[in-house]
Image (tube, rainbow, N blue to C red):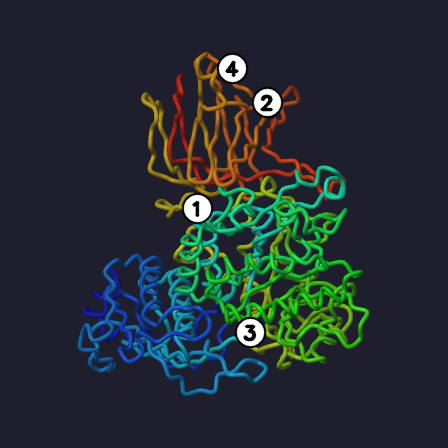
Amino acid sequence: MQGPNLLILYPLAFVYLMVQNVQQISAQIPSIKSFAPSNSYFVVDSTIQIIVDPAFAGASSGGSGQGTLSDFAQTFRDDLISVTGFSNISQAQNGDVNVNVSSDSLQSPTVFLTLGSSSNLTLFNGKPTGEGYEFEITEKMYTIRGVEPIGAWWGTRTFLQQAVLSIANGSYPAKIPTGTGEDNPGWEIRGFMLDAGRHWFEIPFLTELCIYASFFKINEFHLHASDFIYDPSFLYGQDWRELYTGFRFQPSAESPIFSLVPELNESWTKDQFTTLQTTCSNHGVRIVPEIDTPAHSLVISKWKPELMISGTPDLLNLTYPETLPTIKSIWDEILPWFTSDEVSIGADEYSSSLGDDYIAFVNNMSEYISHTGGKSIRIWGTNEPSTTESLSISTNITIQHWWFPGGSIPVQLMNKGYSIINSDQVFLYLDGKFSDGGQFPWTLNTSKLWSDSTPDGQGWAPNIFSATDPTNNTAIDNPLLRGSIMAFWNDWGNNATTPLEVYYQLAQSLAAFGEKTWAGSRGGMGRENALTLEEFDEVYPLLNAAAPGQNLNRALTPTNGLEEEVVFSYENISQFPFVTGYESVGPPYTLSFTVKPSSSSASSANSTALFLGLDSVLYLDSLTFKDPSTNLRYPLGVDLPSDVFTSVEVHSTVNYTYALFNGSQSDDSKLELYYWTSNLDIWGEYMEVVNMSFAAPSYVIGLNGFEGELVNVSLKLGA
C-alpha cells in the first residue's frame, strides 16, 4: 500500500514513525552547502504538483544564454516524471490557476519555484552568484528560491537527487526530510571540454551528454570544434592533405567559407546547433565553442594552402596579408550562431619565431569578436612567444591553463591581472580509449582528486595547479580564478571510440568533477562538509543510473531483479526483418543466436545485417560491427559457413566485446575468445591495438535481404 493511503488510514502512526526517524538529507553530488532538518518529511507521491511564481515565470539569467524560470520548470517536470514514474504531474504558472502557496491550504505536495533569495550567496572569492538558491521544506511544500532562474534550476537538481536516493534506499514514494537550507557553487565556471575536431559526434549524443552533466551541476560544455590527427610523417611531407581534419560548423551553401568544411556529413547545420544550445540552456549549461587558430589549423590550410607557413601546414602564417581577414571571415559566418557570451579561439602551440605577430593576432581577435559579436574570448594557456617586453596579451582575455612549465604559469598570470581557468592536464585530462605512455587515466583519478593533489595530501580543487609545487597554487578566494574545465581529447580519431565509449570514460569523471568544482575539498580547499571519497563512491552509482532526461547507459528497467535478466528470447524467427522494440541495450549484455546463412546471403554478406540497433549494426560479413555515427566498420575476421548452423555468443562490457563460437573450446579446454578491436596510429610512431565496446544491436533482426535460418536468439543483461 502506497503513501497516500497510509496517511489516510494511519495518520497518527505514520507521523510518529516519521518523527522518530528524522535524519539529514542524503549525501549527494555535488554536496549541499548547508541544511538544518526539522521533524518530518515531504512525501513525493503521485499527487505532487509544481507551481511557478507568476511574478518570475518569464525571468531569465542574463548574459549566459540560459532559459527562463518557466523553461526550467517544464524541464524539471519532465525529469520528475522520469525519476518517479508519475505521469500526471501538473504545473501551474502565469495565472493558469489561483496560485495559493500557503502550506496550510495545500492539499497536495507542492514544489514552488520562485526568486529572491534573502541570503548573501557568494562564490569563494566573494563575488555574488546568480546560481545560488535557498530551499525550505515542509510536509506539504518544497520551496526553491533562486537568486536567478539558474539558481532555482540547480535547486531542482538537489530535489531530484534526494528523491532518487530516497527511492534507492527503499522508500516509495520518496520522502525528503523537512528543514531549511542554502546552496551555491564555489566557482563560476564548472565545465568540461570535448574534442569534437578529431572525432565526429552527432547532435543527439552531444545533447544527452549535456543533459547528463547538468544533473551534477556542471554549467559549461566547451566544444573543441576544429582540429586534425597528428602524424608527423604525413604532416611534414608531401601527403599532408591526407591527414584527417574536422571543421564541425556547416555554413550555408552560399557562404564564401562553405568549401572550408571537409566532410559535410560530419558537420552541424545552424538549426542543429541551435537545437543543441537550446536544450543545453534549458538544463543550465551553456555551450562555449572553439575554433582553433593560428595553430591546429590544418583544415584551413587544406582549404587555402597559401595561408600556411611553408613546411608546417598546421600553422597559419600571420605575416601573410590575407590570413587575418580569412580567419575573421570564418568568425563572421559562425559567430551569430552562438548564444554564449564567450568563445574560444584556441591560440595554443604556435611558433615562437612569430611571437609578436601571435600576440597582435590574439589581441586583434579579442577586439574584433567583442566589436562584431559582443563576446569576450578565451585562449589556451601558452607561454607567450614574444621577444618584445612591452607587448603582451590583453588582460581582457581569459587564459585557460593546461600545461607548465612549457605553458603558462597561472599564478604569475594572475599576478599580472589575467583571469584564469584551470584545465591542468595532470589532474583534468582524459584521452579517448588510450593514453600514450599511460600519461592520462581512463577516467579521472578519484584518489588524486580526493587526497593526492598537494604535497600535504589534501584533495584537489580548482585553485590547485600542481601536486608537487605549492608555489604554483593559489587560494580558493583568488578573484581572478574563474573556475575549472576538465578536458576529453580524441587524439586517435573516430576509429578509437564509439560515442558511447566516450561517455563511459566521462560518466564518473563528470560527477566527481561536479563535486570538486562546486564544493572543493576539505582542509582549506573548500567546504568542510564536502563529500568524502567514500560518500561519493556510495551514491554515484545510484545517481548515474537514475540521471533523467537521457539514457546514455542505454539501460532497461529491470522487471525481475535477476542479474542476467532476459530482454528477449525467440526460438525461431521465420520472417525478416523482425522488429523487437528495443532500440539499443548497453553493456553488460550477452547476445546469443544460432545462424545458418544461405549461399546467397553469404555472397552478399557485406550488406547483410544480422542485427541492427540505434548505436550499432552487426553484419554477416566477417561478423563486422559498424558504428552508425561514423560509419566505421570493425571486422572480427570470422566468416560463418553457409548452409551450416553456427552458434554465436556476443559478450560485451564497457571495456570490450568478444564472441564465442559453438562453445569455442580449444584442445586444452580453455575458452577461445575472439575480440573486436581497432588499430590506433599513435603519433605516427607505432600502432596500438585496443578493444572495442558496442551497445547491443537489438532493434531489428535480419535486415537487407538476409536469407537463411536464425534460431535460439536471445539478449540477456550481464556479460
Dot 2: what SS? loop
Instruction: Name which residue type carries label 1.
Output: Arg
**What is the total number of numbered labels drawn onto the structure image?**
4
Work out whether mark 3 precedes mark 1 in sequence or the reverse, and give the earlier one.
3
Work out whether mark 1 precedes mark 2 in sequence or the reverse, and give the earlier one.
1
Instruction: Name which residue type carries label 2.
Output: Gln
> Mark 1 and mark 3 in contact (Cβ < 8 Å)?
no
The answer to whether residue 174 shows anywhere in this view is yes
Which label number is shown at residue 668?
none
Which label number is shown at residue 665?
2
Return the x and y of residue 576 as percentages of the image width and height.
Answer: 34, 24
Tell me the quarter of the image containing the N terminus: bottom left
118 vs 236, nearest the viewer: 236
Return the x and y of residue 453 as percentages of the image width and height.
Answer: 70, 67
Distance Cα–Cα, label 1 vs label 4: 32 Å
Left or right of residue 179: residue 351: right
Distance Cα–Cα, label 3 vs label 1: 30 Å
Instruction: Name which residue type carries label 3.
Output: Ala
449 vs 481, nearest the viewer: 481
Residue 391, quarter of picture: bottom right
Distance Cα–Cα, label 2 vs label 3: 53 Å
Work out whether mark 2 precedes mark 4 in sequence or the reverse, and give the earlier one.
4
Instruction: Name which residue type carries label 4.
Output: Pro
Distance Cα–Cα, label 1 vs label 2: 32 Å
Which label number is shown at residue 641?
4
Work out whether mark 1 precedes mark 4 in sequence or the reverse, and give the earlier one.
1
Dot 3: what SS? loop
Work out whether mark 2 precedes mark 3 in sequence or the reverse, and give the earlier one.
3
- Write down the residue under mark 1: 554
Vertical side of 162 occupied by 314: above or below? above
Residue at 60% x, 27% y: name it: 671
- Write down the residue under mark 3: 519
